[in-house]
Image: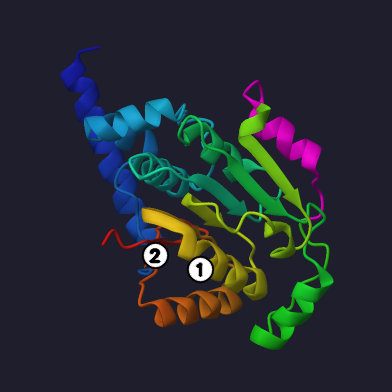
Amino acid sequence: MNTKIIRKIMFLFNKARLATAEIILPARFFVQERSYACFYKNAFPGFRSRIAEFNYRPDKLSRDANRWFMLNLILGQVKTCELGDYAELGTYRGKTARVIHQNMNQGSCLYCFDTFEGFSSDDVTSETKYSEVDVNAGLYGDTNMEIVRRYVLETRDEGSLILKKGHFPETFRDLENKRWRFVHLDCDLSEPMKAGLEIFWPKMVAGGIIVVHDYNGHYAEGVQKAVSDFCRNTGTVPVPMNDSAGSAVIVKNIL
């Protein structure tokens, strides 16, 4: 079939899809103008090459595509920072850790801090007092270090992944002098979130980035309060990401 005819058909189909969605959905819903596959195809070249490096597959990508696109761009940006390692607080089964590990600088290490047994009872008790959010000890406990190691590494160098099992910040001992390019805080609860921000921030390299998961998400009240208090005290600004998890980005001042 003629290419121009195909394009015309696709244009009319997309127009009908948008019109239908805008009629059916409430006004508060944002209707995506283009599919992610179409967006990728028409994106600027630098973005396309980044996603190609990221092994982009429109049919297999997580439902929260914005999150993975944004993480990829951020990880690409911190590669130009001075020497530093990568960290994640709250790894669960290693989905985000794998993305970080695949996109970090060669010669760097990824440190993953987790109980690998779910939420600790102490943190859950503190959360109830701090934000009155009702969560259960042991939630996200269906994981272990071997599951994460196997999923993140595949055939890559095992020395570039260091799993720290236990309660944070006790598991941070002997790492006080480390410098960090990128940190992902996905601990869901206010106490470990506060500890993570206070411990990692002073050692972030200039231009280094912290991504806070659930800033506007499921456990938003406690996490958002912890992040807001930290940013107010440090004079920083949490910039929201447009992912479904409600993440936020905090960048270390270059000056």
Q: Residue 51 in the image: state x and y as whole percent.
A: 38, 32
| Quadrant holding the N terminus | top left
Q: Residue 78 in the image: state x and y as whole percent.
A: 38, 45
- In this view, the residue in front, 218 or 105, is 105
Marker count (numbered): 2
Report the amino acid beneath label 1. Answer: Tyr
Element class at badge 2: strand
Dividing the picture into quarters, in which one does residue 204 lie? bottom left
Colouring of the image? rainbow
- Residue at horizontal 47%, vertical 26%? 55
Visible residue check, residue 219:
no
Mark 2 and mark 1 lie on one chain; the one further toward the N terminus is 1
Report the amino acid beneath label 2. Answer: Pro
The residue tagged 2 is 240
Relative side of 17 to 109, left or right? left
Separation of marks 2 and 1 at Cα, in angstroms: 8 Å
**Highlighted range, magenta:** 141-157
The residue tagged 1 is 215
Relative side of 251 to 169, left or right? left
Relative side of 105 to 186, left or right? left
Element class at badge 1: loop
Dividing the picture into quarters, in which one does residue 22 lie? bottom left
Q: Residues within 10 Å of mark 2 (few under 14, many from 20)?
A: some
Dividing the picture into quarters, in which one does residue 195 lie? bottom right
- Residue at horizontal 34%, vertical 45%? 17
Report if the CB atoms under discs 2 and 1 are less than 8 Å apart. Answer: yes
Relative side of 203 to 13, left or right? right
- In this view, the residue in front, 253 or 62, is 253
Q: Residue 98 in the image: state x and y as whole percent.
A: 59, 37
- Residue at horizontal 54%, vertical 52%? 178
Is 52 drawn above or below residue 122 in the view shown?
A: above
- In this view, the residue in front, 46 or 181, is 181
